[in-house]
Image (spheres, rainbow, N blue to C red):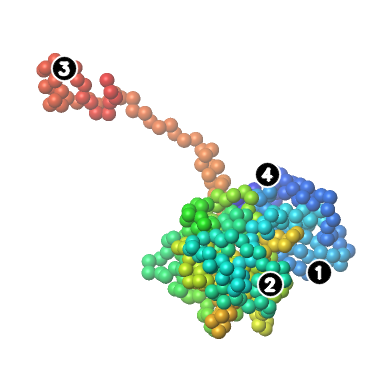
C-alpha cells in the first residue's frame, strides 16, 4: 500500500471501483504490474478464462481476495467470477481490469510462499508419550525453542472431530522466519484519561495495513484510542530483543462497522445477547502511520472473502501474545504459537470454529491455514473468543469475511490512497516554493569592557573581551 498513491483518481461506489482517469505515472505503473503478471504466468496452463471474452456476462462472485505482492510493492484485490465458460479473474485494486488467463495464473503463482516454508514447522500438539519424553529432559523455561519432534505418519496430531488436547499436553512452537514478523503485539499508546483500553494481538496484511480484533480497539466505554503501538514479531521464545523489527504507530483504526462494531457505539455489542453477530464481525483494520521496516523475503498471507468454510480437520496455526501459555507460564511479552485444526460447526454459525487453545491477550492474533504444496499462506480468521467444555475441550472462535467486508476494505484502500496523495502533493508544493534566505547580521560583534579587561589594560596585557565574537 505504500505505493498505492502511484495510481490515483479512483472512487468506490456501490462496491465497484470506478477508474476516472490515469495520469502518466499511473499508466506506467499499470503497464509494469500487467507485465509482472504476464511474466509470472508465462509457460503454464491456466484454469481461468477471460471475463470479457466469455459468451455471457459473469453470473456470480465465487470469492474475493486481497494479498500484498512484494514484486508489485502493492496490495492487490481481486474477484473470481463465474462465467459460462469457467472462472475468470477481475482485478479491483490498484486498478480495475479483467486479467487474461495468463495474468490470472501469474497472480496466483506470485502469491505462493517459498517452498521451504513448510520445513520450518513440525507438529506441536504431541501425544502424551512424546510430551513426557520432551519434559523429562526439560531444563530451560517453557518458552525456549525445543528440538523438533516428528510424529509417526499414522498418528494424527489431534483427534477427530477434532478436539484440542488437554492444555498440559500442548507445547508452543516457534514461528518460522518468513512469517514471524507478521504477528503483532497491539498496545494502546494514547487514550482518553479514565478509559480502560485493552492490549491484544494482530497480524500484518502489508507493510501499511494490519488487522486485529474489534474489541482490542473499542474500549468498554465505547472509545477508540487516538493512537496504538504495534510491535511486529515481538519477542519469541528464543529471541532476546523485545522488538526485533522496531515498532510502528497507528493513528487510524477502522472497525468492521457490522455487528454493533462502530465508532458511534456507546459500548461494544453485548457478548451474550448478540453473541453470533458480535463474534462474526469482531475485527478492525489498522492503517500504519509509516510503512513497517520488515525483511524482504516474508510470506505474505492471502485474505479471502466469501470463501467456502474450511473443512473440519484442516491444519491451522495460531499466533498471539497471551498472558499465559498452555502450561500457565510464558516469558513476558513472548508469543504463544500453537498448531490446531478447523473444528466442526454447531448449526449455521456465522463465525468460524477451531480446535485451538487461547488466552487473554491473544485476541486479534492470526489463525493461518498452513500451506501445502501449491497453496498460498492464507489468513483464515482472527482469534477473538475461546469456549471451554469440561475443562478439557477448548475451541477458539473467529470472524468470517464476506463480500460486504471486501467492499469495505476497497473503500479503505481508496480513502488511504487519496489521503496520502494529498499529503504528498502538499509536501511537493512546499518544496517547490522559494524560501527567503536567512538574514545575516553583518555588523561586528558587540564588544564591551569589563572590570577585568580594564585591569589587564592597565597592566599592559592585550586582552579582548566581547560578546558574540570569535577567538582572537
- The 10 Å Cα crowd at callout 4, few under 14, some 14 to 19, many 20 or more, is few
Residue drawn at (38%, 69%), measured in percent from left and top? 194
Tag 4 residue: 25
Q: Report the residue marked by disc 1.
A: 59
Please name whichever residue, 269 or 447, is drawn nearer the observer in this view of the structure.
Answer: 269
* Quarter assignment of residue 210: bottom right
Q: Which quadrant is home to the C terminus?
A: top left
The tag on residue 368 is: none
Disc 1 to disc 3, C-alpha distance:
101 Å
Of residue 441 and residue 100, the one placed in the foreground of this image is: 100
Q: Earlier in the sequence, mark 2 or mark 3?
A: 2
Q: CA distance from mark 1 to mark 2?
A: 41 Å
Residue 88 lies left or right of residue 11; in this view the side is right
Secondary structure at numbered mark 1:
loop
Mark 4 falls on what kind of element?
helix
- 358 vs 461: above or below: below
Closer to the chain start, of discs 4 and 1, is: 4
Are the residues flagged by discs 2 and 3 in contact, CB closer than 8 Å?
A: no
4 vs 3, front mark: 3
Pair 2/4: label in front: 2
Say if mark 2 contacts mark 4, CB within 8 Å: no
* Percent position of residue 402, x then y: 67, 70
Residue under pointer 3: 461
Viewed as shown, does residue 445 lie left or right of 300? left
Give the secondary structure at mark 2. loop
Among numbered discs 1 and 3, the one appearing first in the sequence: 1
Mark 4 to mark 3 CA distance (whole Å)? 71 Å
Neighbour tally class for label 1: few under 14, some 14-19, many 20 plus, Cα within 10 Å:
few
| Residue reaching furthest to the right | 55
Q: Which residue is mark 2?
A: 156
Q: Mark 4 or mark 3, which has the lower sequence index?
A: 4
The answer to whether one can see residue 370 in this image is yes
Amino acid at each position: 500500500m505504500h505505493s498505492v498513491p502511484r495510481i490515483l483518481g479512483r472512487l468506490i461506489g456501490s462496491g465497484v471501483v470506478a477508474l476516472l482517469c490515469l495520469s502518466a505515472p499511473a499508466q506506467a505503473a499499470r503497464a509494469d504490474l500487467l507485465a509482472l503478471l504476464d511474466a509470472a504466468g508465462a509457460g503454464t496452463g491456466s484454469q481461468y478464462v477471460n471475463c470479457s471474452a466469455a459468451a455471457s456476462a459473469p453470473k456470480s462472485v465465487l470469492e474475493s481476495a486481497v494479498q500484498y505482492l512484494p514484486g508489485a510493492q502493492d496490495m492487490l484485490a481481486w474477484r473470481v467470477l463465474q462465467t459460462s465458460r469457467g472462472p475468470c479473474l477481475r482485478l479491483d485494486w490498484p486498478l480495475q481490469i479483467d486479467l487474461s488467463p495468463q495474468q490470472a495464473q501469474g497472480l496466483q503463482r506470485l502469491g505462493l510462499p517459498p517452498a521451504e516454508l513448510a520445513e520450518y514447522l513440525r507438529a506441536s500438539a504431541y501425544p502424551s508419550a512424546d510430551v513426557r519424553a520432551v519434559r523429562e529432559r526439560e531444563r530451560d523455561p517453557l518458552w525456549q525453542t525445543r528440538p523438533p519432534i516428528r510424529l509417526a505418519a499414522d498418528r494424527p496430531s489431534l483427534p477427530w472431530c477434532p478436539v484440542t488436547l488437554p492444555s498440559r499436553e500442548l507445547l508452543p512452537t516457534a514461528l518460522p522466519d518468513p512469517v514471524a514478523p507478521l504477528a503483532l503485539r497491539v498496545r494502546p499508546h494514547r487514550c482518553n484519561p479514565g478509559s480502560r483500553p485493552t492490549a491484544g494481538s494482530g497480524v500484518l496484511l502489508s507493510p501499511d495495513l494490519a488487522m486485529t480484533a474489534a474489541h482490542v480497539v473499542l474500549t468498554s466505554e465505547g472509545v477508540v484510542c487516538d493512537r496504538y503501538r504495534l510491535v511486529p514479531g515481538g519477542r519469541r521464545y528464543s529471541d532476546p530483543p523485545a522488538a526485533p523489527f522496531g515498532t510502528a504507530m497507528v493513528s487510524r483504526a477502522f472497525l468492521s462497522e457490522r455487528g454493533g462494531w462502530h465508532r458511534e457505539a456507546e459500548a461494544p455489542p453485548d457478548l451474550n445477547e448478540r453473541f453470533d453477530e458480535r463474534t462474526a464481525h469482531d475485527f478492525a483494520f489498522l492503517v500504519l502511520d509509516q510503512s513497517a521496516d520488515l525483511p524482504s523475503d516474508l510470506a505474505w498471507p492471502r485474505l479471502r472473502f466469501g470463501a467456502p468454510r474450511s473443512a473440519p480437520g484442516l491444519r491451522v496455526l495460531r499466533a498471539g501474545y497471551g498472558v499465559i501459555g498452555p502450561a500457565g507460564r510464558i516469558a513476558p511479552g513472548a508469543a504463544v504459537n500453537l498448531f490446531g485444526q478447523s473444528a466442526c460447526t454447531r448449526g449455521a454459525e456465522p463465525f468460524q470454529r477451531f480446535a485451538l487453545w487461547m488466552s487473554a491477550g491473544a485476541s486479534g492474533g492470526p489463525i493461518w491455514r498452513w500451506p501445502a504444496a501449491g497453496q498460498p499462506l492464507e489468513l483464515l480468521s482472527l482469534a477473538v473468543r475461546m469456549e471451554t467444555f469440561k475443562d478439557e475441550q477448548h475451541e477458539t472462535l473467529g470472524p468470517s469475511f464476506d463480500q460486504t467486508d471486501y467492499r469495505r476494505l476497497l473503500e479503505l484502500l481508496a480513502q488511504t490512497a487519496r489521503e496520502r496523495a494529498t499529503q504528498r502533493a502538499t509536501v511537493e508544493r512546499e518544496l517547490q516554493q522559494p524560501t527567503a534566505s536567512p538574514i545575516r547580521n553583518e555588523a561586528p560583534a558587540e564588544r564591551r569592557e569589563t572590570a577585568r579587561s580594564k585591569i589587564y589594560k592597565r597592566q599592559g596585557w592585550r586582552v579582548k573581551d566581547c560578546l558574540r565574537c570569535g577567538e582572537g
